[in-house]
Image: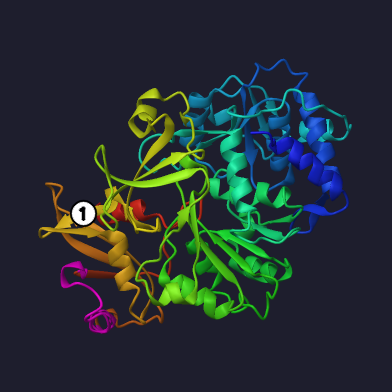
Amino acid sequence: MSKNIITVFEQIAKDNSTRIAYDEMGKTTTYADLSSAVDTLAAWLSTQSLPDRSPILVYGDHQVEMIISFLAALKAGHTYIPVSNDSAIPRMQSILDTAKPAMIIAVNDFPSNDLQFDAPIVDHQQLEKILATPQTFDTSAMINGDELAYVLFTSGTTGSPKGVEVSHDNFMTFVDWMLSDEFKIKEHANFLGQPPYSFDLSNMYWLPALLNGGTIKALPHEVVENFGQMFTALPNLDLEVFVGTPSFADMLMLSPAFNQQKMPSLKTFLFCGEELTVKTAKGLHQRFPDAKIFNTYGPTETTVAVSGIEITPEIIENNDRLPVGYAKPGVKLSIWNGNQEITTPGEQGEIVISGNSVARGYMNNPEKTAKSFFKIDGVPAYRTGDAGTLDSDGLLHHKGRMDFQIKLHGYRIELDEVRASLEKSSLIKQAVAVPKYNKDGKVTHLIAYVIPNEATGDTAGLTKQIRESLDGLIMPYMMPTQFVYRESFPMSANGKIAVKQMVAEANK
């Protein structure tokens, strides 16, 4: 590939020198200052005698120094590893043991005393000192082509987190797609920067924004955690592109100010990371009637997202579960049963992705790499573990995780399908279905965790009303036998509903 992330960024920065590239709650950085800081840090890194192409761990929240560090690492010829400052110590130790970074750039205070590692740390004070003396640096050493751009560690809800190795060209082809006519993102757009940089959904906003001459409107973790502060801040950000999970959008819709009247510039919603439900899409269309809503799909292992589709009111009305789109250029989607590709349209199996978005594998983990990554006619491919179907025209429908499919009374049941059916009730705001297992590991019944539309003390009466409202809308064998009412659901650091945590709680 001829294009390089760094050279494209530098040209954009030159053409937009006085524009704001980064805005963290009023603390702004122009493109000229951002580009200068990247050069300065890259020049300093080049003097540190780090092993060639070695990884640099970058630890922090949503500060502009995170972006400076990513780009400087790439320009100086190093892979970067983003780690969120709210990461648990065992997770961080696992990342350090696996990646063995050559250096740690700590934008936030690094918990050194609780961890074992050999890498030198650049703390925030040292980083400030480095950036205070501007330097120039050429592009001769920069990461390019099939070399690794970043390693992103998965959430690791079961076992140790796996480090997904994403190449420069994997990343560049994704950004090219995001900025193509398919999504119609206008030049110089303001992007919401809420997903943490340790979550690959962040790659849907930070680099597309910078290579578009746009502005990243960063929302630090502490602001997201404070609903009052977040709801007050959002209407003042002049957002034009929303990037986030459906769960985060549901959270924002708790605010009456999250609508087109208060936020008239917000015209594009980009969703990934979990299923976009009919209920969420319908609510957004009601609040933002002039906005375009895009549903995308893709595991971390295939560089953020590999399929996309605009979710129109017609699609909402004609589907119980929303499709996740058509393959991006350079990618082939296929459905498999074991090692055999299914060619019958509409027949369900495992989603397999091949093409230029497929990552190299898992860092220093050949066993797990061999289990999930392979080649189809010489082209890199990845077994997703997700169930799905393809229409005759190539439209992909995601049917949930294959490990979220259960057998109950002889029926195969998809937990996401139960959730989608429950949310057809006007009495339910949000629902999650989880299985209850007996001591032999067999499913005895389904439990529905429900956030009702209106709080009530009469849960027995509400359960009866919900059952009646779903008559004819849910298959009888899919109806949960137990309903548990909640004000909210536990969320992962990435803004997803922590379903596996809820399954574990239900089966203590």
Q: Residue at coordinates 72% horizontally, 48% vertically from top-left?
A: 211
Q: Mark 1 belongs to which amino acid?
A: Ile
Instruction: Tell me where the magenta segment starts and ends, as one range.
Output: 461-480
**Residue under numbered circle 1:** 406
Magenta stretch holds residue 337 = no
**In the image, residue 193 above or below residue 120:** below
Q: Quadrant of residue 200?
A: top right
**In the image, residue 227 above or below residue 490:** below
Which of 59/487 is in front?
59
Q: Secondary structure at mark 1?
A: strand
Image coordinates of residue 296 in percent, x first then y, are 49, 56
Q: Quadrant of residue 51?
A: top right
Which of 90/31 is in front?
31
Could you tell whether 61 is left or right of 321 in the image?
right
Magenta stretch holds residue 472 = yes
Which of 282/354 is in front?
354
How many neighbours does mark 1 have within 10 angstroms: few (below 14), some (14-19), or many (20 or more)? some
Could you tell whether 364 is left or right of 208 in the image?
left
Image coordinates of residue 155 in percent, x first then y, are 45, 43
Q: Quadrant of residue 252?
A: bottom right
Residue 85 visible in the displayed image: no
Q: Residue at coordinates 66% horizontally, 60% vertically from top-left?
A: 185
Q: Residue at coordinates 47% horizontally, 37% vertically from top-left?
A: 358
Could you tell whether 174 is left or right of 343 in the image?
right
Q: Name the dominant secondary structure of the magenta segment.
A: helix
**In the image, residue 200 above or below residue 265:** above
Q: Residue at coordinates 57% horizontally, 79% vertically from top-left?
A: 287
**In the image, residue 276 above or below residue 171:** below
**Number of numbered discs present?**
1
